[in-house]
Amino acid sequence: MKIQRNILLVSLFVLLFSVSLLYSGITGKIAGRVIDQSNGEPLPFANILILETTMGTVTDLHGDYFIINIPPGVYNVQARMMGYNNITVTNVKVEIDQTSVVNFELPMEVIKMPETVVYGKKIIEPDVTYSKSEITGQEIERMAVSDPIEALLTNTSMVVDPSRREIHVRGGRGGEVLYLIDGMEVRDPLVGGGLGIRVDDTEVNQMEIITGGFNAEYGNSQSGIVNIVTREGSIHEHSAKLSYKNDHILMEQDFDHYGRAKNSYNNDRTAFSVGGPEPITKHILPAMGVKVP
């Protein structure tokens, strides 16, 4: 009976540890302090909200707060407290494994007029101990590339093996690079190196490239890590995107003596994506008179 209980405890520990590894390295953090503008005293129990999301928190007795597990992106953060004006800090950029510091100074509510502060500070990175660079999805869409892997070559630490289409980081081989998509390891099942799944450039929210000194949360890597976080749909509105790319239309072709194009693979690729809140609880059930909490 004792042996069975020990086996159960070990299995539970392995399961919890595996889940924690699965979600490592795909979110960021917002932290800061809320004080009274008139005297600098901390304001406990002030509400901190990330607008247009369901994320938020309250300050502690010292006026400090933090919000974790935030997907990378740009947000508007608002501080509220009874007796004080609401303050909104706009364009707060959250990146993978980084802390964005947003402090608030709340004025007494004399005239009921909300104040908006434009966020222009550089993200503080005291917890970053490794060499890295980031590429956002918007930057990849503006590049003349067919997929995120080609965008990696804009990093000076990376070169491509033309025969195997593998990325080499700082002299390492293709199999020494760890590829993560939304926290899950993805490797080519045939050769072991390279990205084992095709990701369209329209599906990328942010891509992080770590080239040295990475933390223990990233295993099975020797020369570099490519961490890709995919996009999520908005909870407030629907959106759709259609894109088309080719390598032969409006291009001057150079043919060999067999009649094959030297500078083109005659490829055409169309991508279509739709995102937004799911319609059942948002529209269908309310139309049928069913109240959704």
Image (tube, rainbow, N blue to C red):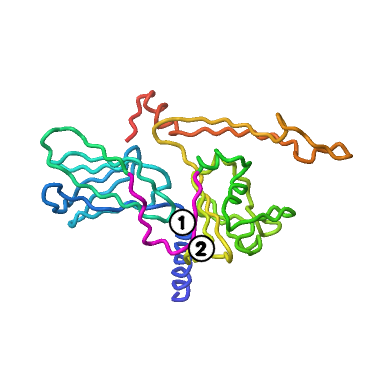
Q: Mark 1 points at which residue?
A: 25
> How many discs mark residues in the rendered view?
2
Task: Give the extent of the magenta segment.
Answer: 120-136
In this rendering, position of residue 114 left or right of residue 231: left
Q: Is residue 235 magenta?
A: no
Few, some or many C-alpha atoms within 10 Å of disc 1 (few <14, some 14-19, many ≥20)?
Answer: many
Q: Are marks 1 and 2 in contact (CB under 8 Å)?
A: yes
Look at the numbered disc 1 and give the secondary structure of its residue. Answer: loop
Q: Is residue 131 magenta?
A: yes
Few, some or many C-alpha atoms within 10 Å of disc 2 (few <14, some 14-19, many ≥20)?
Answer: some
Kindly identify the amino acid type of the residue bearing the numbered disc 2: Tyr
Q: Looking at the image, which residue sits at the far bottom?
A: 2
**What quarter of the picture does the N terminus occupy?**
bottom left
Q: Residue 175 lies in what quarter of the image?
A: bottom right
Residue drawn 18% across the image and 57% down it: 62
- Up the image or down, 249 lies above or below 103; here it is above
- Sequence-wise, the earlier of marks 1 and 2 is 1
**What quarter of the picture does the C terminus occupy?**
top left
Q: Residue 160 lies in what quarter of the image?
A: bottom right
Q: In front: 70, or 283?
A: 70
Residue 218 - label: 2
Q: Position of residue 110 (x, y in %)?
A: 10, 36
Residue drawn 12% across the image and 38% down it: 109
Q: Where is residue 125 in the image (x, y as percent from the top left)?
A: 38, 58
Kindly identify the amino acid type of the residue bearing the numbered disc 1: Gly
